[in-house]
Image (cartoon, grey):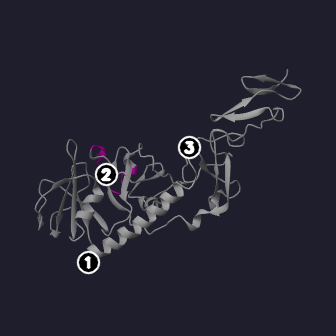
Amino acid sequence: MSRILFGLSLLAGLIPFVAADGLFIGCSQSYPYQDASNSFPSGSFSSATDCAAQCGGYTYSYLFYYGQCVCSNTGPSATSLTDGDEDTCAQRSSISVNIVSTTFDSTTCYSDQDFAAADFPGLYPITDPKQCLNSCANDRLAVLQSEDSAGWYCGCASSTDSTPVSCTDTSLFVFNHPAGATASGLARRNAREAVAQAKRDRIFNVCPGGMTACLVPGLEKNEAWECIDTQNDMESCGGCLHGTFNNATTAVGVSCAKPGVKLGAATCAAGKCLISECKDGFKLVDSQCVVRA
């Protein structure tokens, strides 16, 4: 069996569209393309906030200067950070990186040469920016800095009177916690994110092994899908004919029932159409039926 139809199950009821804060954490020269769980929302986006709003269940959003949005659970590399504020990443042809959901509400950059803050013991190494925000859940400020050779560093503080500067790759990125934001609020938010992630994982794993969730023609906007074995299916050979659910970058398949192919003379194997015989008036050339001259 190469197909499993799910009765036009509408994913709109399953996909979590949670409110996203879209907290800016820097301009980047690259994104974690190697993360297989990345999602690519369809359409072109003009703001990092709009991009982040499409990434419920993910940790980071990446907005390219030409409007492509990428959702990922992998943070940016510390070595990829480049100069630019939230509104100037696109002007510099770089990628605006946001943390999708957090209780911190704004970003301000400061020079690492003259930064002073109350209750600030200094910076310590961390694995990624989101860990810094989690570590400072009980503090008013979270301080983040990238070091090309050493990775990310974080510190917590209660206040600062330092003068803001334009963001660069060496700046201290300081994230503000609004009054009333508490660790319990963060815990509730994290719980919602965990539920969203579980739902998203369930959607991605809904098809049995070796099958792909392909959009149903005519219902692409509602994101109805069916599971298809694209390695052996005659109508979607090599990929989904009408697009793959939640992934705009996968290969588009083809129908092996092409004009000129004799009935029953075409199969799909290993994602490729194999044609053995053509109708009268056609001849077989490189596994294609072409009109005889």
Counting residues from the start of the chain, the first of labels 2 and 3 encountered is 2
Q: Quadrant of residue 291?
A: top right
Region of the chain picked out in magenta, as a range: 79-90
Residue at image location 21% in from the left, 49% down from the top? 170
Is disc 2 in contact with disc 3, using a CB cutoff of under 8 Å? no
Q: Secondary structure at mark 3?
A: loop
Q: Residues within 10 Å of mark 1 (few under 14, many from 20)?
A: few
- Tell me, yes or no, if residue 87 can be seen here: no
Q: CA distance from mark 2 to mark 3?
A: 32 Å
Q: Secondary structure at mark 1?
A: loop
Q: CA distance from mark 2 to mark 1?
A: 28 Å
Q: Which residue is mark 1?
A: 179
Which labelled disc corresponds to residue 250?
3
* Residue found at the very far front of the displayed protein: 1
Between circles 2 and 3, the one closer to the viewer is 3
Q: Secondary structure at mark 2?
A: loop
Figure check: 33 above or below 188: above
Residue at image location 11% in from the left, 62% down from the top? 116
Q: Which residue is mark 2?
A: 84
Name the kind of residue labelled 2 in the image. Answer: Gly
Counting residues from the start of the chain, the first of labels 2 and 1 encountered is 2
Name the kind of residue labelled 1 in the image. Answer: Ala
Name the kind of residue labelled 3 in the image. Answer: Thr
